[in-house]
Amino acid sequence: MTWNVRVDTRLCQGSGMCAGTVPEVFALDGERARARADAVEPDERILDAADICPALAITVHDGNTVIGPRRD
């Protein structure tokens, strides 16, 4: 099982919080973040990164279901 991670570069503010939380999954590319790979092994820290993104630019998908960011 893998998750798909997407960063919407139109929303990303380049805070680097995602890269600081999961550097093996996210990287800063100039002024924006990007996912290092589309498919990643499930890891709770990836959901944490999606949750703390100030622009809500990160989405995590399990198949066709969006699982992050998590909503209260």
Image (spheres, rainbow, N blue to C red):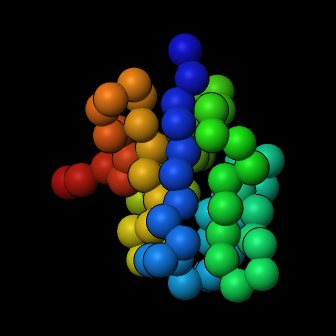
Q: Nearer the viewer, residue 61 or 46?
A: 61
Instruction: Judge whether 14 appears above or below 56 on screen.
Output: below
The answer to which quarter of the image holds residue 61 is top left
Q: Which residue is located at x 42 percent, y 59 percent?
A: 51
The image quarter in which residue 15 lies? bottom right
**Residue 2 visible in the picture:** yes
Q: Is residue 39 left or right of residue 37?
A: left
Using residue 35 as the reference point, say whether residue 68 is left or right of it: left
Which quadrant of the figure contains the N terminus? top right
Residue at 38% x, 47% y is 68
Q: Is residue 20 visible?
A: no
Q: Is residue 60 above or below residue 64?
A: below
Residue ranking furthest to the top? 1
Relative to 33, residue 45 above or below: above
Relative depth, front residue between 40 and 64: 64
**Quadrant of the image containing the C terminus:** bottom left
Q: In the displayed orientation, state which residue is furthest to the left.
A: 72
Q: Position of residue 41 (x, y in %)?
A: 64, 27
- Residue drawn at (41%, 28%) of the image: 62
